[in-house]
Amino acid sequence: MNCPFCRHADTRVVDSRLGKEGNNVRRRRECPECERRFTTYERVEEILPWVIKKDGRREAFDRAKIISGMQRACEKRPISVEQVEALVDQLERRFQECGDKEISASLIGEAVMDMLHEVDEVAYVRFASVYRQFKDINEFMSELNDLLKHSH
């Protein structure tokens, strides 16, 4: 592992621990050249399906993109980064287990909305407003009315 500070090619592991969820390994490393320490995380690389975008393009499943969208929706809400990451872990597992080589972006978006609906209705509405690209206030109000009907 290269040192992120001085780029020395040979660093040594000082400490290894199992991650909180048990699905990764946290390693503290030290560079013999600059003597600085840093942390790395090792996890199994699992095969995720390709995502088919609305315009037909295909791109790799991007965990960071989903986390970013969910974090924006959850901003200033009582939802921790750990909760968001746990939701994305569930989403990844679901798509790995389905065995499909390709999935539509809309399937991912709907799954994220379902998860947010369960966790926080405000975050759900925020995500839905961006994901569904409401054309006007009437579409937005229709979504809010549906939400109110189902929450009682």
Image: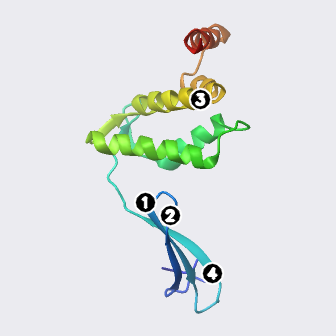
Mark-to-mark CA distance, 3 and 4: 38 Å
Q: Secondary structure at mark 1?
A: loop
Q: Position of residue 152 (x, y in %)?
A: 59, 11
What residue is shown with label 3? 127
> Where does the image place residue 91, in percent across and percent down from the top left?
43, 41
Instruction: Say whether disc 1 or disc 3 marks the residue closer to the N-terminus.
Output: 1
- Are the residues at dot 1 and dot 4 in contact (C-beta closer than 8 Å)? no
Q: Residues within 10 Å of mark 2 (few under 14, many from 20)?
A: some
For label 1, the residue is: 23
Q: Which residue is mark 4?
A: 37
Looking at the image, residue 84 sits to the left or right of residue 97; the answer is: right
Q: Is residue 8 above or below residue 69?
A: below
**Residue at horizontal 58%, vertical 44%?**
83
Residue at image position (45%, 31%) is: 111
Look at discs 2 and 4 and give the one toward the viewer: 2
* Amino acid type indicated by mark 4: Arg
Disc 2 or disc 3, which is closer to the eye? Answer: 2
Work out whether residue 49 can be spotted.
no
Question: Closer to the N terminus: mark 2 or mark 3?
Answer: 2
Callout 4: few (<14), some (14-19), or many (20+) C-alpha neighbours within 10 Å? some
Q: Earlier in the sequence, mark 1 or mark 4?
A: 1
Q: Secondary structure at mark 2?
A: loop
> Left or right of 2: which side holds 107?
left
Give the spatial CA distance, label 1 vs label 3.
28 Å
The picture quadrant where one finds residue 4 is: bottom right
**Res 19 label:** 2
Which mark is first along the chain, 4 or 3? 4
Three-letter amino acid code at the position of disc 3? Phe
Residue drawn at 64 percent across, 7 percent down:
138
